[in-house]
Amino acid sequence: MLDVLGTIKSLGFVQLDTIQYVARAHHHILWSRNQNYREHMLDDLLGRDRTVFEHFTHDASVIPMEFLPFWARQFQRKKDRMDRPGYYKIRPSDDLFKSIKTRITHEGPLSTHAFDTKIEGPKVMWARPPHKLALDYLWYCGELATCHRRNFTKFYDLAERVFPIDISKDAAPDHVQIDWLCRGALDRLGFGSQGDIQRFWEATSRNEVGRWAADAPDLTHVDVQTAQGDWIPLLAPSNIEARMHATPAPTSRLRILNPFDPATRDRDRLSRLFGFEYKIEMFVPAAKRKWGYYVFPILEGDRFVGRIDVKADRASDELIVTKMWPEAGVAWPQSRWDKLHAELERLKRFAGVAQVRWIA
């Protein structure tokens, strides 16, 4: 049964990303967990059903709407950060903030394309015009919310038209939010360090997680052996043993994961637990890349067995495989290659192209 919202709740959030090398990250992440998923399903949850909302975890993400009472502190944390002296080289004017909200109030949802302010000063990488900075500020603070997307373009509306509650009045108390966030992170991680817990949502500070861990009565301390053979002390829920016994064996199917998949996002944890060293190299100069611009991890069961450079070329109607690298020490018998070819066929159908072509 396909339950897209249930999958997002189970993961906690799904990261958004604009790059469509095969498919955009959020769609690929959901498809990796159920191959009946199609892109319109997430769009419906956001724009029609209002069962998810967009905001910032470690990056822009889709979050279940029922988590909203526990997310108020994140709106405030973002506002506090942007209000610090020196955050902006040129802060948008109060008149611009007011005019944007007035237009949206009277005209309805608007995208950044509805505004035409220009970049002030020299044009440098990541420079944005004042209206974009103002829209971002109002979105981070929770005064505006994403109401829908059209061809991935975000449309902003007043938060009270999108959110089912007044987050400034109906939020849970701050200590309850911290407890919910920490427990939610640990529940999904299974076990982890205080840093693992803090990095999961990026909605608490290290000190807040430390105080929570010291005061929580129902945690247990466990020792976990890393992929490098070391034993490290970590935190776990008190029922960790029962959870381990109830956890089903991983599928033997091979999966090509998105670089922003939750299974690989925390690179330190990925290295410690799986011995898989991974880095997205899109911002690395081409001559210095070890692997490639957008290389996908390959997961088989509970083991990373390689990585692959594959891209959907919709003009030629092909899924093009540039190169595949087996992981060191992992044998690739014909049975494993057969699994890879089967996954490429599945990925081809998801990307909506007709054939797979290897060029290496």
Image (cartoon, helix red, strand yellow):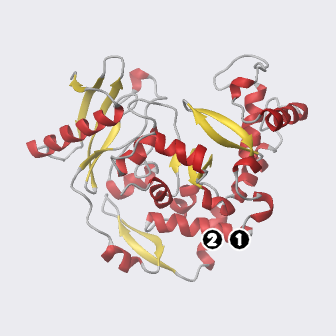
Quadrant of residue 349 in the image? top left
Q: Which residue is mark 1?
A: 175
User: Residue at position x 46%, y 80% from top?
Assistant: 238
Q: Position of residue 103 (x, y in %)?
A: 82, 32
Q: Nearer the viewer, residue 229 or 293?
A: 293
Q: Position of residue 19 (x, y in %)?
A: 48, 31
**Residue positioned most to the bottom:** 217
- Could you tell me if residue 337 is visible in this image? yes
Which image quarter is the C terminus in? top left
The residue at the far left in this view is 334
Q: Is residue 289 left or right of residue 111?
A: left
Whether residue 142 is visible to the viewer of this picture, yes or no, is no
Image vertical order of residue 166 relative to residue 177, above or below: above
In this view, the residue in front, 351 or 201, is: 351
- Frontmost residue, 44 versus 311: 44
The residue positioned 86% from the left and 31% from the top of the image is 96
Can you tell which quarter of the image residue 148 is in?
A: top right
Q: Residues within 10 Å of mark 1 (few under 14, many from 20)?
A: few
Q: Is residue 105 above or below residue 186?
A: above
Give SS at disc 2. helix
Q: Which residue is mark 2?
A: 179
> Residues at badges 2 and 1 in contact (C-beta under 8 Å)?
yes
Q: Quadrant of the N terminus?
A: bottom left
Task: Kindly state the secondary structure of the residue where label 1 is placed.
Answer: helix
User: Residue type at mark 1?
Assistant: His
Q: Is 210 placed left or right of 308 in the picture?
A: right
Q: Does residue 118 appear left or right of residue 53 in this picture?
A: right
